[in-house]
Image (tube, coloured by chain):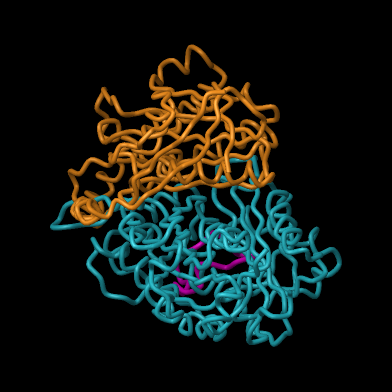
Chain colours: A orange, B cyan
């Protein structure tokens, strides 16, 4: 099971979208940062698709969804809730969409009029590599000729409305059955049994703690792999699934 | 290609903490939607919902809603976590309260905690309200292709929170409180007076297995998944196209996948959430799919009875659909009194209907336009 990498893009600067793609910006300016970045990255690789309408889309939900606006609303609501009065709270419904996991996928499917069968994977650790598995499977089985895997993410900094977020990024990669210069040969997984308990302890400890930083590992993980240009890329533990040691094998043709 | 059978399940629903409680409640034609005390106290404009009768701390509720149905299903199947892959939907991030502080519950972290002991693949599905049906469909596909021998599939949600109650109210998706109306009557799928859904919580897990493996270990076959289809509306972020084209495409793909013609559909467990835009679009899709048989093919929705448990909905529906096949009984759509002019189908109204239903379509349509349908049979007759 293998496939080819036809194009990829990483987008980290949301301000570039407005200048580079004003039409896209008008469509997405009210979305939250991860979705803006995901769609901007997807925009850059669309020319590599032979048929955007019939390509298979595999979306990656943000590991850290939401937005500063939604976070503020949650706090206002919480305060009102404690007072027993929330009826006066009025909010633009678009902010509710900032919580929706498949917003980026929905927006892209509308933009390129794609009605094909679909996958969207959630914001759990390691789902980016599941998305690549899915793409390879679709291509090797003949179910698809080209697959666009894409997603965007942010760290707690953006979620809280802080100006700098070094980890926020959008990533998109076009994988095809048709030979290209770079081949994705496979994804190896071996159990990391020695670190399993520690990983789980960290996961359990992080659950529900207000100050914990949710790691934007999906888009960041893909961006790290694509930028590394290594024949054997060992996924850093922070971008893995906490269970397996994941290695991606590529081959330049 | 392998045949894929359902051999066990677990369910938490507003009717109770077992699949039997769900089925009995649905067949009885009653509503488990009721006032949510904390939403009443908080002065929300929508105070009804479907709450699962299980005591947990607010902080741990998401884990319980996933782990308990999974554990129940695995215990029923006699399988260990490590013998099954996981295709699971955890819904959206939510907030809880801990020591008076607003605490985020990350859906992704919940999935990771639940998934770690399962075999690969461990896949978190995120297609909004279509997620659990999509999860079952993807598990079915993996087993049928021989990549996986057994899997747990389904989903859970804890989105019955003030934040989502208000958020979806702002999106005009929820049935706001109406003076003088019984809380259980809030969600009225396909009815002339429908005005949205009631938010609810829950979780449901199905164990899917390769039929030969199931037979070899003497597992009981509850039903069989024979087809899966998905599609995208590519229309709007918050409403389906009025003609239901995406829903129709998805149902047709599921039937094509099963190698069945629409004539073989004996009943439909519909998405049917009771929204003004969604219900007629779904009806239009069903009518085109079935042709003249729309007049005689029973259609039901669970949402009037249990509300809309989002990421768990498709799995609870799949259990109901499988039970319909097994028992020859289609539950009624609760609160459907007078089908709207543009919602005319052969609705099951008032009481459960006895019917021979060897093939059932179970359908879920997500906000944003991702659609998923699975085809379920009794098992055995569809070699």
Residue A199 point in image, percent of width and height:
23, 51
Which span of residues is magenta-colored? B179-198
In the image shown, does B112 or B52 lie closer to the viewer? B112
Left or right of residue A233: residue B175: right
SS majority, magenta: loop
Left or right of residue B129: residue B94: left
In the image shown, does B353 or A56 lie closer to the viewer? A56
Q: Is residue B98 above or below residue A38?
A: below
Left or right of residue B262: residue A73: left
Residue A172 inside the magenta-drawn segment: no
Residue B291 point in image, percent of width and height:
84, 63
> Residue shown at 63%/84% (left/top)?
B326
In the rendered image, the residue lying farthest to the left is B99
Residue B187 inside the magenta-drawn segment: yes
In the rendered image, the residue lying farthest to the right is B292
> Residue shown at 22%/67% (left/top)?
B57
Residue A29 is at least partly visible in this image: yes
In the image shown, does B210 or B90 lie closer to the viewer? B210
Left or right of residue B123: residue B248: right
């Amino acid at each position: 099971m293998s496939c080819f990498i036809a194009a990829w893009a990483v987008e980290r600067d949301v301000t570039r979208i407005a200048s580079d793609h004003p039409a896209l910006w008008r469509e997405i300016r009210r979305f939250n940062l991860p979705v803006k970045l995901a769609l901007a990255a997807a925009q850059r690789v669309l020319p590599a698709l032979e048929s955007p309408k019939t390509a298979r889309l595999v979306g990656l939900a943000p590991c850290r969804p939401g937005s500063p606006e939604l976070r503020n609303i949650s706090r206002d609501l919480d305060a009102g809730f404690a007072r027993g009065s929330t009826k006066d709270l009025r909010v633009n419904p678009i902010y509710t969409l900032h919580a929706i996991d498949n917003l980026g996928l929905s927006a892209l499917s509308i933009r390129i009029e794609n009605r094909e069968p679909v996958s969207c994977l959630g914001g759990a650790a390691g789902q980016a590599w599941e998305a690549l598995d899915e793409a390879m499977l679709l291509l090797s089985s003949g179910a698809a000729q080209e697959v666009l895997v894409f997603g965007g993410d942010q760290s707690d900094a953006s979620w809280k409305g802080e100006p700098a977020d070094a980890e926020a990024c959008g990533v998109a990669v076009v994988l095809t059955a048709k030979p290209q210069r770079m081949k994705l040969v496979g994804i190896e997984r071996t159990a990391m049994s020695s670190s399993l308990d520690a990983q789980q302890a960290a996961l359990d400890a992080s659950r529900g703690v207000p100050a914990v930083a949710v790691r934007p590992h999906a888009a960041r993980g893909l961006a790290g792999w694509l930028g590394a240009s290594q024949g054997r890329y060992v996924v850093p533990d922070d971008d893995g699934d906490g269970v397996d040691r994941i290695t991606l094998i590529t081959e330049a043709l | 290609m392998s045949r894929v059978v359902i051999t066990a399940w677990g369910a938490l629903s507003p009717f109770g903490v077992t699949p039997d409680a769900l089925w009995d409640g649905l067949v009885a034609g009653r509503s488990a939607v009721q006032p949510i005390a904390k939403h009443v106290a908080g002065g929300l404009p929508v105070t009804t919902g479907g709450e699962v009768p299980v005591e947990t701390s607010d902080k741990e509720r998401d884990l319980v809603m996933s782990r308990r149905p999974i554990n129940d299903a695995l215990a029923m199947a006699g399988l260990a976590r490590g013998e099954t892959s996981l295709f699971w939907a955890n819904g959206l991030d939510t907030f809880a309260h801990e020591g008076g502080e607003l605490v985020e519950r990350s859906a992704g972290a919940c999935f990771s905690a639940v998934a770690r002991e399962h075999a690969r693949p461990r896949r978190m599905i995120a297609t909004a309200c279509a997620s659990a049906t999509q999860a079952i469909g993807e598990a079915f596909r993996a087993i049928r292709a021989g990549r996986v021998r057994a899997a747990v599939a389904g989903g859970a949600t804890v989105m019955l929170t003030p934040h989502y109650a208000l958020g979806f109210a702002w999106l005009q998706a929820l049935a706001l409180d109406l003076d003088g109306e019984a809380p259980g009557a809030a969600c009225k799928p396909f009815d002339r007076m429908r005005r949205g859904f009631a938010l609810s919580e829950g979780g449901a897990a199905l164990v899917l297995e390769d039929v030969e493996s199931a037979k070899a270990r003497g597992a009981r076959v509850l039903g069989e998944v024979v087809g899966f289809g998905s599609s995208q509306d590519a229309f709007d972020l918050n409403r389906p196209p009025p003609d239901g084209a995406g829903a129709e495409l998805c149902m047709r793909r599921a039937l094509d996948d099963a190698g069945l013609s629409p004539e073989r559909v004996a009943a439909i467990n519909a998405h049917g959430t009771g929204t003004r835009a969604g219900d007629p679009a779904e009806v239009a899709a069903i009518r085109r799919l079935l042709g003249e048989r729309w007049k005689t093919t029973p259609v039901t929705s669970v949402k009037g009875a249990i509300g809309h448990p989002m990421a768990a909905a498709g799995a609870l529906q799949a259990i109901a659909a499988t039970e319909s096949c097994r028992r020859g009984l289609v539950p009624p759509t609760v609160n459907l009194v007078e089908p709207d002019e543009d919602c005319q189908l052969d609705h099951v109204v008032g009481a459960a209907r006895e019917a021979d239903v060897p093939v059932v379509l179970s359908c879920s349509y997500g906000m944003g336009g991702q659609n998923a349908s699975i085809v379920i049979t009794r098992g055995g007759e569809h070699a």
